[in-house]
Amino acid sequence: STTLAYPDRRVAAAADLPVNNVSMFNYPDEDSPCYLLRMGEPVPGGVGPDGDIVAYSAFCTHMGCPVQYDGDTRTFKCGCHFSIFDPETGGQMVSGQATENLPRIVLHYDTKTGGVHAVGVDGLIYGRQSNIL
Ligand code: FES
C-alpha cells in the first residue's frame, strides 16, 4: 500500500494572530476543521517567532463533537460530555470521557515569509482510520 503524504498548507501569517484567540482552518482536507491558536508564551510544539503558535483538530476524541476554545481557562472544552484538553501541553486531556489527547496539527514557520504552515497531524482525527483519506 502507498503511504500518502500530508499536504503543506499555509494557514496564516504569524504576525496577524492575536494572543489567546482561535481562528479556524481545514486540514488535512476540507472535512477536518482545526483551530489555530497563539498562546502568548512558548509552549511544546509551538512555532513562530515566539514559539507560541499551535493548532489542534476541532473534533473531540471521545465521540467527535466539536470542541470550543475557552480563553479564560485556556483550554478546549467539549460540550457533549465535558472533556477538557490543554493546548499548552500538546493537547493533553485534562479531564472527561475521552481517552486520547486532542490531535495536534504539526506546524512549520517559514521565516522568510512569516507564514505558518500546516504540515502534518500528530494523533488520529476522530472518526478516521487514517488522517489522510
Ligand atoms: Fe467530547 Fe464526548 S464527544 S466528551
Image (cartoon, rainbow, N blue to C red):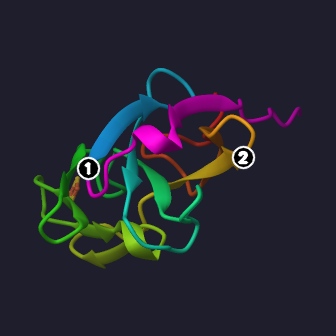
Mark 2 residue crowding within 10 angstroms, few (<14) / some (14–19) / many (20+): few
Judged by depth in the image, the label closer to the viewer, 2 or 1, is: 2
User: Please, which residue is most extreme toward the top here?
Assistant: 30
Looking at the rendered image, the quarter that the N terminus falls into is: top right
Q: Amino acid under label 1?
A: Asn
Rendered location of residue 121, percent (x, y): 61, 49
Question: In the structure shown, which secondary structural element does the residue marked by tag 1 occupy?
Answer: loop
Front in this rendered view, residue 50 or 59? 50
Compute the Cα span from label 2 to label 1.
22 Å
| Left or right of residue 115, residue 70 in this image | left
Rendered location of residue 5, percent (x, y): 80, 34
Residue drawn at point x = 19 percent, y = 60 percent: 77
Give the residue at mark 1.
21
Give the residue at mark 2.
111
Residue drawn at point x = 71 percent, y = 32 percent: 8
| Left or right of residue 31, residue 6 in this image | right
Rendered location of residue 64, percent (x, y): 30, 45
Residue drawn at point x = 37 percent, y = 56 percent: 61
The boundaries of the magenta stretch are 1-20
Ligand 1 visible in quadrant: bottom left
Q: Amino acid under label 2?
A: Thr
Q: Is residue 9 magenta?
A: yes
Rendered location of residue 59, percent (x, y): 34, 45
Q: Is residue 92 above or below residue 12?
A: below
Prevailing secondary structure class for the magenta stretch in the rendered image: loop
Q: Is residue 69 above or below residue 39?
A: above
**Count of numbered circles on the image:** 2
Residue drawn at point x = 71 percent, y = 30 percent: 7
